[in-house]
Amino acid sequence: MAIATAVRDRLTERWVATQRTYQERDVKRVCYLSAEYLLGRALGNNLLALGMLEAAQDALSQLGVPLVDLLEVEPDAGLGNGGLGRLAACFLDSMATLGYPGVGYGIRYEFGIFTQDIVNGHQVERADEWLKFGNPWEFVRPELSVPVRLYGRVEHGTGPDGNPLARWVDGKTVLGVPYDTPVAGFGTNTVNTLRLWQARASDEFDFRLFNDGDYERSVVEKNDSETISKVLYPNDNFQAGKELRLKQEYFFVACALADIVRRFLKKPRDLRDLPRFVAIQLNDTHPAVAIPELLRILVDEHGLAPEVAWNITVQVMGYTNHTLLAEALEVWPVSLFERLLPRHMEIIYEINQRFLRTVQIKHPFDTDRQRRMSLIEEGVEKKVRMANLAVVGSHSVNGVAALHTELLKRQVLPDFAEMFPTKFNNKTNGVTPRRWLLLCNPELASLITSRIGPAWVTDLDQLRALEPLATETQFAGEFRRVKLENKKKLAARVHEGVGLTLDTSAIFDVQVKRLHEYKRQLLNALHAVWLWMRARENPSAVIHPRTFLFGAKAAPGYQLAKSIIRLINGIGEVVNADAGRTGIQVVFLPNYRVSLAERIIPAADVSEQISTAGKEASGTGNMKFALNGALTLGTLDGANIEIRDAVGADNFFLFGLTADEVEATLARGYHPRSVVEQDPELKAVLELVASGFFSPEDRSAFRPLVDALLNEDRFLVLADFRAYVEAQSRVAHAYLKTDDWTRMAILNVARVGRFSSDRTIREYARDIWGIQPVDIKL
């Protein structure tokens, strides 16, 4: 805490100067609305940004405290589930580094993504108490608190000008209290703000009830209100969970928009000018309720005509889509919306009526099209389609990889792409090289800087200068030494954490990401079983020792995903006992998070990016691994395609069906059992898993997993299995040729410059937000 507050003091000077400059120059700002921010640890990143890392190391060494040990004490700020939240954190870093005026808005979850324990192979969730000892990086701003209304009813009347007037009344009010965190740019004076909102009861304590002896009811209102910011994305399998999640989404959006309008009106301005000074980016559909909320503010609170308010809203809003999975496109029951947000439901109906009239005029007899494009899904239970709302209410809709954007237009939202062709654009994701190379892999960063200078840290394209060094013996030797040292460090951590001794000469084959069927951790696990079964018959079948490293969290209510974690651990129990004979190890690293990723990624030899083609929007783990010299084994999915184009097909291990082939396979009728019948080795693997061999305490534990594969195999694990096995064989043979492997790894580092989040943010600023960088003077 002492060193954090010392660093914070130096940040604050820049922070004050930044905000003062923005205000004095009256600059346009981007307001980034995201329900998730997977920030990780802040101390090391802030020391780097301020150029204080060496000074801190020297000062602490005089006290006998190694900085590297101190950094491990800080808890991760795990306010996100995966790639969506980590991308938001990278974007904040790049905005500040490039000098773009920006503010991030989200929720200050008291408990972040759960802490994962592995007990008898099973995932067990514990609360993530990241705020237990306080957070030195945040400043509470109670004077900027915002009242947020929920429930209630709508009164309709006529305003002084004779126009219809709506008033949202009654219900309950929750206070949103902002906590500000500085976001420092690297090597610049810019420090932007992340403003996270905590929910508090407006009437904290009913003293009358307390005096009457009803102690529990006296604080029930307080507890009910504060639940909103208690836990990151509650398990929404049940109605109460769904209601709380919608409350969370509206709560932070209402706070953010109230804050944006308040700041805008601090100067005598007309709200019609809002698009000149504000750009709002919706990070997926979670903040899409911002569209009816801004309309409500403009029409109900400030008296603008609905048509004028609509034009302002569309000009201000931009929407980023992050998924191709139909089940991940948010829909909310109309009954829930009407009860929780009655005024917003009216506004959505009004938007829908006007929009469908436009569709009808353009396609007068196409009722199916109108049904598909409606913001309301008709059925047994009416639902609000948040993705449709986000598209209609924004001036820009972007995907996050070239293939994703194409499939978004062709498969997910084709009617909208046809109607609004100029709205759709692509912004391929990126990662910040500050955290994902300079901070997490200092030895490699130092080696690179010694040869090409330090400018690559803010201009990643300069890594191209490494290409001629890929065949230089001395540089290649140093590159290999750095990789081996990183593997040793990870091995030490694994030994300390799970008690397993890793063979650092083995191929470190890594798959770390959120656990979901489409990401196909199961395909990887089945291959490990296949390889082990072959090695049992003939140890020489293992071309080179292999360590399979997994890290993943499954959503608490996602039973099939949790079963895959149990299977991976079951495989490990068997395979690791036999490692001396086969050279194969399988390790599941508990509690995967940003700080653990910072240790794993620099040590990886192989980056597993094996999602079913056409299912992953982009991925950013694939970029982080390539940047740190791991070779990708992957499908033509998401940003894999662009990474392969950038690094060269010869430096990428490709396998599997393409997105078009996946679509065609499913369209003509896919029969997974016939695939298994034609592949005796695959059949033997599945029979071994189904038999309970890897779950002796419950012989039927994995039968549902195998049945799901044999009966449906939604994500074509079995269809791609043989191609995957053959690709893994190519990996093993390639690894034997040490010089060639090193050259391929160096070329991966040298050619992934375009996957910097700096490039992505420049594209957003130019094409969507219309903002300019601002130079901050101290």
Image (spheres, rainbow, N blue to C red):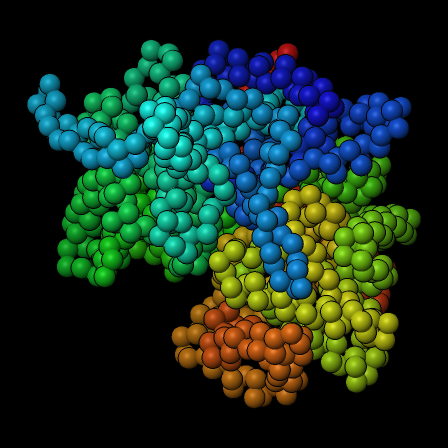
Quadrant for the N terminus in the image: top right
Near-viewer residue (765 or 594) = 594
Point 80% across, 25% down: residue = 56
Quarter of the view holding residue 725: bottom right
Farthest residue to the left: give it.
162
Residue shown at 69% from the left, 71% from the top? 571
Most extreme residue toward the front is 213
What residue is at 86 percent from the left and 72 percent from the top? 580
Q: Is residue 700 left or right of residue 596?
A: left
Determine whether, in the image, residue 616 is placed left or right of residue 383.
right
Answer above or below: position of 444 versus 559.
above
Q: Tell me: 768 left or right of 97.
A: left
Using the image as rendered, state which of residue 263 and residue 332 is in the foreground. 332
In the displayed structure, 637 sits above or below 250; it is below
Q: Position of residue 753 (x, y in %)?
A: 66, 43
Q: Quadrant of the C terminus?
A: top right
Residue 446 in percent (x, y) is at 82, 38
